[in-house]
C-alpha cells in the first residue's frame, strides 16, 4: 500500500504524541516526536551553560548547533522510541519541568528551527512517517496527505501532564504546570518563525471530552479514509 506522511500539530500536552505513537505502531510507520528534539537542544543548553538564568547565549548556541546530534532508538521495554542526545539516552531528563520552562524560548530561534527542520525533513523523505509538533503541517511537511490539529482546554491539558508526572513519581504542582502550558502556548503562537497555527487543510480535533481509545479510533478512521481514497 502507498505510504503517506501524517502531521499532527497542536497545543502543548493535549495528547498529540499519545495518538501519533499509537497510530504509527498500528500501521507500521515511523514515529518522530519533534518536540523531543527542541527539548534535547534545551537540555544541552542548560547542561552546557548556554543559559544564564533565562538569558540565552545565542552566539554560542549558533556555533555549537551542528555539534548537537539527536536520534531516536526503540526502547524494547516500553515499545516506544527514546530520545538520545549525542549518544546519551535523555528521554526522562527532557520531560522535566526545568526543560519545559526553558524550551519555548529556544524554539523561537531561527537557526535552531532551521537545523531541526532539516533533520525532520530528512527523516521523512521516504514517507511512512507520523510526526507531531507545532509546525509539521505548516513548515516541515506542508504537502502531508493527512494533517491534524489538536486542542483541548488548558486546564484539562495541565491535568493530563500533572497526572503523568505524578504517575512517574516526579514532583509536580498543578498550578506551575498550568502556568507553563499557557506560557508555552503564548510563545509558540506568537513567535516570528513558524508560529503554531492550524494549517488551512488540517482537520481540527478538540479532545477535551475524549478518552485515549476514542481519539485513537478517530485518528485511525481519518487515516483509513485517506489511504482508501
Ligand atoms: N484523551 C485523553 N484523555 C486523558 N489523558 C490523555 C488523553 N490523551 C493523552 N492523554 C495523556 O495526557 C498526557 C499528555 O499527552 P501527550 O501525548 O504527551 O501530549 P502532547 O504530545 O500533545 O504534549 C499523557 O500522560 C497522556 O497519557
Ligand atoms: N515542531 C515543534 C515541536 C515543539 N516545539 C517547541 O518545543 C516545545 C516542547 O514541545 P513538546 O511537543 O514536547 O511539548 P508538549 O506538548 O509535549 O509538552 C513546545 O512548547 C514548542 O515551544 C516547536 O517549536 N516546534
Image: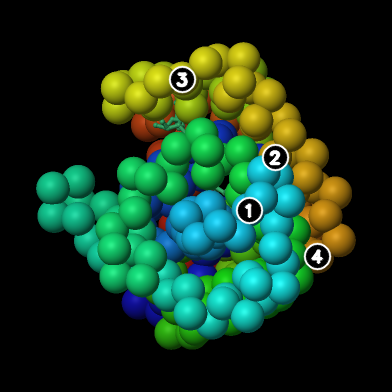
Q: Nearer the viewer, mark 1 or mark 3?
A: 1
Residue 15 on image: x %, y %: 50, 37
Q: Quick check: can you spot residue 12? A: no
Residue located at (79% from left, 39% from top): 186
Q: Nearer the viewer, mark 3 or mark 4?
A: 3
4 and 2 marks in contact (CB < 8 Å): no
Question: Can you tell which quarter of the image residue 147 is in?
Answer: bottom right
The disc placed on residue 184 is 2
Residue 134 on image: x %, y %: 65, 54
Residue 189 relative to residue 161: left or right: right
- Name the one closer to the observer, 193 or 147: 193
Disc 4 within 8 angstroms of ligand 2 (CB): no
Residue 204 on image: x %, y %: 68, 43
Q: Quick check: can you spot residue 170? A: yes
Q: Which residue is mark 1?
A: 51
Residue located at (72% from left, 30% from top): 182
Q: Nearer the viewer, mark 2 or mark 1?
A: 1
Residue 195 on image: x %, y %: 79, 56
Real-space CA distance between mark 1 and mark 3, rounded to the nearest whole angstrom: 23 Å
Q: Earlier in the sequence, mark 2 or mark 3?
A: 3
Quarter in which the N terminus is drawn: bottom left
Q: Which residue is mark 4?
A: 193
Determine the secondary structure under disc 2.
helix
Amino acid at each position: 500500500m502507498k505510504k503517506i506522511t501524517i502531521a499532527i500539530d497542536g497545543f502543548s500536552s493535549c495528547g498529540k504524541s499519545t495518538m501519533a505513537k499509537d497510530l504509527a505502531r498500528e500501521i507500521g510507520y515511523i514515529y518522530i516526536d519533534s518536540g523531543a528534539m527542541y527539548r534535547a537542544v534545551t537540555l544541552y543548553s542548560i547542561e552546557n551553560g548556554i543559559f544564564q538564568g533565562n538569558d540565552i547565549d545565542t552566539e554560542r548556541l549558533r556555533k555549537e548547533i551542528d555539534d548537537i546530534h539527536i536520534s531516536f532508538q526503540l526502547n524494547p521495554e516500553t515499545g516506544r522510541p527514546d530520545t538520545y542526545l549525542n549518544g546519551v539516552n535523555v528521554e526522562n531528563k527532557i520531560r522535566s519541568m526545568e526543560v519545559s520552562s526553558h524550551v519555548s524560548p529556544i524554539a523561537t530561534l531561527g537557526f535552531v528551527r532551521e537545523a531541526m527542520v532539516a533533520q525532520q525533513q530528512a527523516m521523512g523523505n521516504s514517507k511512512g512517517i507520523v510526526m507531531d509538533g507545532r509546525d509539521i503541517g505548516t513548515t516541515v511537511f506542508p504537502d502531508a496527505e493527512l494533517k491534524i490539529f489538536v486542542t483541548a482546554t488548558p486546564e484539562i491539558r495541565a491535568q493530563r501532564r500533572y497526572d503523568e508526572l505524578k504517575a512517574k513519581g516526579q514532583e509536580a504542582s498543578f498550578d506551575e504546570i498550568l502556568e507553563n502550558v499557557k506560557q508555552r502556548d503564548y510563545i509558540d503562537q506568537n513567535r516570528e518563525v513558524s508560529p503554531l497555527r492550524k494549517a488551512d487543510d488540517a482537520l481540527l480535533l478538540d479532545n477535551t471530552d475524549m478518552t485515549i481509545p476514542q481519539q485513537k479510533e478517530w485518528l485511525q478512521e481519518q487515516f483509513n479514509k485517506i489511504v482508501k481514497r
